[in-house]
Image (cartoon, helix red, strand yellow):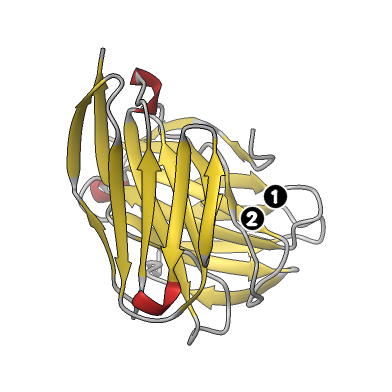
Amino acid sequence: DSGVTQTPKHLITATGQRVTLRCSPRSGDLSVYWYQQSLDQGLQFLIQYYNGEERAKGNILERFSAQQFPDLHSELNLSSLELGDSALYFCASSVEAGVKNTEAFFGQGTRLTVV
Amino acid sequence: GIQVEQSPPDLILQEGANSTLRCNFSDSVNNLQWFHQNPWGQLINLFYIPSGTKQNGRLSATTVATERYSLLYISSSQTTDSGVYFCAVEPQSRGSYIPTFGRGTSLIVHP
């Protein structure tokens, strides 16, 4: 158990809908990252938050947004869903950001299926 | 951005065999991690190893940062070792630690 909790584990929804994925980082970790894993793209970095503030953005679509709350949990919102958004979405956390000797730990992922 | 190449892309072994997985990266790195993604999709931390050598049971890893590569050794492989092995790095040039993943090595261990 990595200590990073993601809910839900599975989600099936229709095209055009909106979903929210939730992540609770390990106790004491201030930084949260979101990744998307699809069959043809591998693990793609989406966005990072550190202590409530956005720190870095990767290949995140405009239809997607995220935030980190004061209690450090994070949510990833996916809207106007398309079939191609079907993927495994991972959350990871680490103690610091931009510091050497920082190890990231991943949650179990949320498997999103858009039908 | 930094390029991370893993080889081989696919590997099939008989139980008990040894194997070496390689990760090459195109730039100097601050951090390097090896992960195992099991058949259920979970990403499990194997090693945090920006340089040097570490061992954990049947697994060991070596990173030669000056030559920009890392190796993961699996000895006496078991069927439970099956899955995808990922290398993830963070380049020195980047101001924020964001693991950048290779495409992985898919390992199947037959009984």
Residue at the limit of the structure toward the top, as seen here:
B111
Which chain letter goes with mark 1?
A
Graded by Cα atoms within 10 Å as few (under 14), some (14 to 19) or many (20 or more), the crowding at tag 2 reads many
Q: Amino acid at mark 1?
A: Pro
Q: Label 1: state its secondary structure.
A: loop
Q: In this image, A30 relative to A92: left or right?
A: right
Residue A81 visible in the picture: no
Q: Nearer the viewer, residue B19 or B108?
A: B19
**Residue at coordinates 62% horizontally, 59% vertically from top-left?**
A103
Q: Please tell me whether residue B96 is drawn above or below residue B49 in the rendered image.
A: below
Callouts 1 and 2 close, C-beta under 8 Å: yes
* Image spot of residue B12 (x, y percent): 18, 30
Q: Nearer the viewer, residue A40 or A84?
A: A40
Q: Please tell me whether residue A86 is drawn above or below residue A66 in the rendered image.
A: above
**Dot 1 or dot 2, earlier in sequence:** 1
Which chain letter goes with mark 2?
A
Q: Please tell me whether residue B89 is drawn above or below residue A80 in the rendered image.
A: below
Q: Nearer the viewer, residue A17 or A89?
A: A89
Quarter the C terminus of chain A occupies: top left
Q: Which residue is mark 2?
A: A93
Q: Amino acid at mark 2?
A: Ser
Count of numbered circles in the view: 2
Q: Are the numbered discs 1 and 2 placed on the same chain, yes or no?
A: yes
* Image spot of residue B83 (x, y percent): 33, 32
Q: Label 2: state its secondary structure.
A: strand
**Residue at coordinates 29% horizontally, 55% vertically from top-left?**
B22
Q: In this image, A65 relative to B111: left or right?
A: right
Q: Which mark is residue A25?
A: 1
Q: Which mark is residue A40?
A: none
